[in-house]
Image (cartoon, coloured by chain):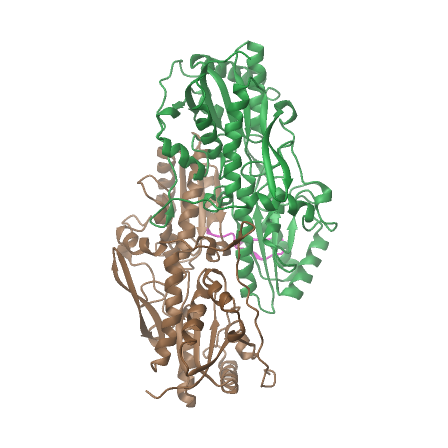
Chain colours: A green, B brown
Amino acid sequence: MAELVGNLLVAQSGGPTAVINASVAGVIQEAGKHECIEEIYGGLNGILGILNEELIDLNEEKAKNIEGLKHTPAAALGTCRYKIDFKKKPEQAARDMARLFEVFQAHNIRYFFYAGGNDSQDTSNKIHQEAVKRGWEMRVIGVPKTIDNDLPHTDHCPGYGSVIKYNATTVAEVALDVGAMATDDGACCIVEVMGRSAGWIAAGTILARRRPDDAPHIILLPEIAFAEEAFLARVKETVSRLRYCVVVVGEGLKNTAGEEIGADKSRLDAFGHPVLSGAADRLAEIVTGKLNLKTRTVKLGYAQRAAAHCASELDVEEATACGNAAVRAAIDGKSGFMIKIVRIQSNPYKWTTGTQPLDDIANVEHFIPRDWISEDGFAPNEKFIEYARPLVCGELKMPMEDGLPKYVILDKCRLEKKLPPKT
Amino acid sequence: MAELVGNLLVAQSGGPTAVINASVAGVIQEAGKHECIEEIYGGLNGILGILNEELIDLNEEKAKNIEGLKHTPAAALGTCRYKIDFKKKPEQAARDMARLFEVFQAHNIRYFFYAGGNDSQDTSNKIHQEAVKRGWEMRVIGVPKTIDNDLPHTDHCPGYGSVIKYNATTVAEVALDVGAMATDDGACCIVEVMGRSAGWIAAGTILARRRPDDAPHIILLPEIAFAEEAFLARVKETVSRLRYCVVVVGEGLKNTAGEEIGADKSRLDAFGHPVLSGAADRLAEIVTGKLNLKTRTVKLGYAQRAAAHCASELDVEEATACGNAAVRAAIDGKSGFMIKIVRIQSNPYKWTTGTQPLDDIANVEHFIPRDWISEDGFAPNEKFIEYARPLVCGELKMPMEDGLPKYVILDKCRLEKKLPPKT
């Protein structure tokens, strides 16, 4: 393998997580060890910023701030949901791709790392293929990132362990509250969590259940069609036994007709997915209306994916390692791959990283296997618990200032633009 | 002062907090030092359980579990919202009061401690007055508790420091997320927090703002009538400058007519009940509709008051000390008082406890002074910040098990009932 000398560009895409910045730190710190990598640049707001030649010099950042990225949530480089869509907008996509390569060539980008989820891995794959087509020698490696945990081939995704650690902690705490308030009239609380059409995040809250009667009492997974009568019967039975019932619902829960029960179909995001927001409120209407039961909702929204203060230490380690591994794979001559986490064993948990062709990843969604879910469909089973339990382990030592976490803001020293503005 | 020998009863009332159990631990641990206190009982679900003679023997609990209450959120004894209402239901109130004293006398209760907010302090006061009237020598001390921070005379309430620590942390994290996602199209996120008609909780999120452009960019306090046009202008200006805007709203925000903006009586849900959309959802409608700006909401609900994993260490210390002080005040012969926190100085923060007659407390709500709020009404000012900053300091060392906090569940060894059931 001939050594490829040139500059590195790393960027972030899609919804942030508590640990996606750790992956960027991992890329930067590993890249610093390899002489063939000359400059280390960051692209602002993913490919959207790269199209506008908005690049920063990451070697200008303080080393302690790069290290501090490991406990800083969200996307320190900024992110985007921009899609290069050859099917729906072929001309725009062709123009975008040409522009991206103008930017890559103007800045001699020979190593490109893109941290993101399904759509972003698709983008990475297209860029890899385009580089081959154009004969521009550049190594493209995808870094996995999504709280949704729905990327295939990787055991799990960086970001997932932290979101379920926070959500399970929250469910345990909310359950103590609701249980303490419950009188003979009963009470119900519905916690809505993210995850789109995959139930991994909702399922992860099962870790809060240490004893059989602990919350969550019901977990509604998007993988299982919502059965209203069976659900109401289960709520009723739980409340009559315990005086309260805590329900966790994945935002993408569907009815038997396959429609999302909380979807507002009038609103679509940039990728054409429906905006999901109302599953808990819809369920609360049903419970209040049919069972005449006092019902409250909790909608953690962005708070769950940004909750670095409750991040999993293992998740941070793995996210960092994925960044490291991406650079090493590229140095080894690979392009068109995504880094994946490989589980060696569950108890005690041991893992390593590997690579998977982006062709196998892009636009494939990975759901919870049916045999990891209880027969009645209201909770994941022991197989899931064995899988998920190690992922929440360890706590970060968060630097604090005046009682609040001290997060890093990058200086973002801009590179001089070499190209005319994008048309 | 003649020594009063007999049993102690402690109970909890109203909405739970992250530290109300610390106050109970403080009562129990202090009581254990005084020989005049013979048995230490807990009342389940506040006076509601006491009316039903549902008492437990707290001396049967493991000492490590009593200590563990200091990091366990919610109300370990259970709580209630039951009101003895002599105005609206005089006959029921008289029957309840008579029954309470049957229970007190049957179990020789000579020390009664009730941890709660405004309504609960009113209940304590009525019980104190009734004891005097009946000639039943019993010392009644209220222990302050409310995340809302709206009790008068105490510098602040146990529970408040923890809720604002968690909410400010969350706002800082959410802001990084929204800021990272923001493109030139702009983005708005609205975080709804508790506090009823007082803005203390909403105001406390100002601690997340370390630099002038940090979130929260706008704080809508229930103390200030909602001015839609000025609000929209401020959102627009913020987004045009920063590309995003994070708004914190207190759930009890009112319009100029004094109506809560989250209670939209014109809309009915599927069951014909008025939609209580909540302040954040209502504001999101306004922002989306009037500014055509992508807007998301976060509704932390019960999660914020139960978030012991992010509790303020100072808050736990103060809550414990209030429990200790309540017992010492009663031993000293006091009855009909609430323990209060007295600030000696702000920087460095020094405090002690004191007592205040319950007559001064009951049913009085304490709001943010107007001169602690900026002239434009969109944020608290430096006076508030000086007040609030010390309250979030210090982190608990939370015992963990499998990556999640290990909270205490009491054994709740029931006392044998001595009375016929309540009629």
The quadrant of the rendering that contains the N terminus of chain A is top right
Q: Quadrant of residue A405?
A: top left
- Give percent across and percent down for residue B177: 45, 38
Give the answer, above or below, for where B273 lies relative to B1. above
- Give percent across and percent down for residue B148: 40, 60
Q: Which residues are magenta?
A: B266-279
Give the answer, above or below, for where B362 lies relative to B270. below
Count up the numbered dots: 0
Residue A85 shows up from this direction: no
- Give percent across and percent down for residue A273: 59, 34
Q: Nearer the viewer, residue A390 or A130?
A: A390
The quadrant of the rendering that contains the C terminus of chain A is top left
Give the answer, above or below, for where B123 lies relative to B245. below
Q: Is residue A282 magenta?
A: no
Give the answer, above or below, for where A261 lies relative to A420. below
Q: Quadrant of residue B322?
A: bottom left
Residue A326 shows up from this direction: yes
Q: Nearer the viewer, residue B401 or A307?
A: B401
Asked if residue A273 lies left or right of residue B355, the reply is: right
Considering every residue shown, the one lying at the far bottom of the view is B135
Q: Nearer the viewer, residue B59 or B420?
A: B59
- Give percent across and percent down for residue B124: 42, 76
Q: What residue is rendered at 63% in x and 36% in y?
A: A343
Considering every residue shown, the one lying at the far top of the view is A135
Q: Quadrant of residue B195?
A: bottom left
Q: What residue is rendered at 34% in x and 61% in y?
A: B367
